[in-house]
Image: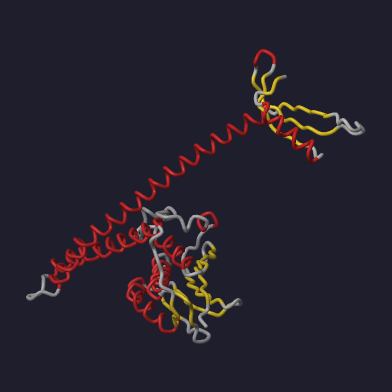
Amino acid sequence: IIAAHEDVYYRCRKRLLESGEPQSCELPMLGSGAVNFWAHLAISVAPGTGARPVLRLMLSDISDRKHLDQALQAKNAELEGAWHAADKANRAKSDFLAGMSHELRSPLNSILGFAQLMQTSTPPPSDADAARLGHILQAGWFLLALINDVLDLASVESGNLQVVLQNVALHDLLPDCQALVEAQARQKGITLHVGPCTEPLRVIADPTRLTQVIVNLLTNAIKYNRPGGCVDVSCRLAPGQRVIFSVRDTGEGLAPDKVAQLFQPFNRLGRESGAVQGTGIGLVICHHLITLMHGLIGVQSTVGVGSEFWFDLPQAP
């Protein structure tokens, strides 16, 4: 057998003679009939050979392993290329969604503004016109909420969604959140109970984004509740200087397989054709916002009993 690269062999032999330590290397070889293969060469000094060392060479055919290594490297390169292409496409999608959302909000704000002006015009609109304006505003506000959610989701996926962490007093924030959803609760006959914090709790959070998360959880608890149900809100201090915020409802509850899908974007768990409007984006955004504020979010749910959504945040000093 003749080594295709004898210099590799001689360097290996030289290191053995200088150090006395066994050496090894991998060599491309030429076999009979000029068949190429890879060999593992181990060189050592045979024991008891006196002043003139006798070298012991062991060759192992490692062609199969080499072929597997080469195939694996080629596959890894292919997968890396596919990942970069998918990442580029995903970023392009996020940039498109962000740009589109900004472009849609301007004309929609004009539509909502003129509809509100017509509602309060003099003389006032007729009952029929007032009803039509109400439909325009209801659909417009829902569409604006959808656009805002898509914009937030695009910001999340592009890594541009940021939070400004501050010292936030929950007892100051909760009444504002409650006021934003009370009308919706009354309309659906849902009793909303916001329990007082066990003590004046303060957290490290972005107040605007924290309000967004709480209002989203309260809105979901009202929307997916049973008629005449209730929503209980509580917060408490937990070990490790954490504050836990909880929203418990008396809705239908969720099976374990549905719970596992809750934080997937645009997944409404089979309720797309139901009477309750939604986008399937809100909880995804809540998850990212709580994570950005160094917290955790989760849910416990029992079919026929209801669900409890909770999150925790660092307690402020």
Q: Is residue 173 left or right of residue 234?
A: left
Q: Position of residue 131 (x, y in %)?
A: 18, 67
Q: Quadrant of residue 22?
A: top right
Residue occupying image coordinates x 92% and y 33%? 48
Q: Position of residue 84 (x, y in %)?
A: 44, 44
Nearest the viewer among 10 and 303 is: 10
Nearest the viewer among 122 and 54 is: 54
Residue sitting farthest toward the left: 123
| Colour scheme of the picture | secondary structure
Quadrant including the N terminus: top right
Nearest the viewer among 20 and 255 is: 20
Q: Position of residue 56 (x, y in %)?
A: 83, 29
Residue sitting farthest toward the top: 33
Residue occupying image coordinates x 42% and y 54%? 267
Nearest the viewer among 70 and 107 is: 70
Residue occupying image coordinates x 64% and y 30%? 66
Residue occupying image coordinates x 54% and y 80%? 236
Q: Is residue 261 left or right of residue 134?
A: right
204 is higher (above) or lower (below) than 264: below
Q: Position of residue 75 (x, y in %)?
A: 54, 35
